[in-house]
Image: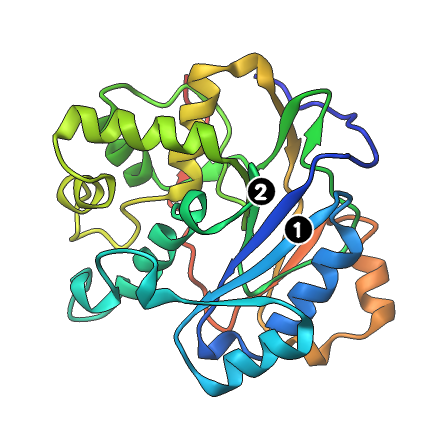
Amino acid sequence: MSLSPNVQLSSTTKIDILIPAIEKDLGTLPFVIDAVRKYVKHPIGEILIVAPKRKKMIEICRRKGCKFVDEDKVLPLTKKDINYRSKTWDRSGWLFQQFLKLSGDSICSSNFYLVIDADTVLIRPHTFRSAQKTVFYCRNWSQDEYFKTYKKLLGRKPSSSLSFVTHYMLFEKSKLVQLKRAIESKHGTRWYLAILRNMNKSKQFAFSEFETYGNFIHAAVPSKLILKQALNKGLHMNVTQISKSQVALLSKKYRSISFHKRKDYVRKLQVGRP
């Protein structure tokens, strides 16, 4: 599978934006929203912020013209129902946010919706549909456990040699429904329960929504994908500490920057899988 260098500079496909967020994201969230409006070269429908019902979060949504969605009203389960932790880490909220991202088919109005992490700011123009194909931004490393869970869920190995875990992804609602139906048909239960039952909860990185959806689409319709390098730069600083000139310099090499307050990803596996 090769990377495609060229896509349309803009698209007429209308998309919604879905951003899961929590209170620690309040500092970066306004910058994420502004960058989406500036650099996503699509007609944008609604920007949905899916978050805990907190006064500050609701105020940001009002100020930025976004739709607030109470995260506890999206699924039959909430973060409190997920027990994904050890003595040294707690990933329950991280996993719950993945379930929220995979719930865009029920809360978004447009046929396509873009999920972007609340700590990731776009610094270059992005198009996610070109010539009736979806553009996926990829990297060359991932977590081996993601692929083990994928195989358990769908009964086959992932077909992509690149990783789809890159902080943002365009979902097509009809394709997402197909993925959920495939999981539910195989396991005889709701898709989120199947994930919880088939991931190894002793591992800190056991499931990826982006890896699962991307590989599902790649296996089903590989000719309908355009793959580009993600070119994301992780920065361990506050978003207010970076200047416009520094962003301009970074944009010559990178497409996006992520403001990590701690290292959430461990490079355990260099992926070059069949």
Task: Report the disc number at residue 193.
Answer: none
Position of 208 compared to 192: left or right? right
Check the image and name the residue furthest to the bottom. Answer: 55
Residue type of the residue flagged with mark 1 = Gly
Find residue 199 and report its image quarter. Answer: top left
Local packing at callout 2 (Cα closer than 10 Å; few below 14, some 14-19, many 20+) is: some
| Above-or-below relation of 51 to 148 | below
Q: Position of residue 128 (x, y in %)?
A: 67, 36
- The image's colouring method is rainbow
Which residue was labeled with disc 2?
110
Q: Secondary structure at mark 1?
A: strand
Of callouts 1 and 2, the N-terminal one: 1
Residue type of the residue flagged with mark 2 = Ser
Quarter holding the C terminus is top left
Task: Report the disc number at residue 45.
Answer: 1
Determine the residue positioned at 40% across, 25% down: 216
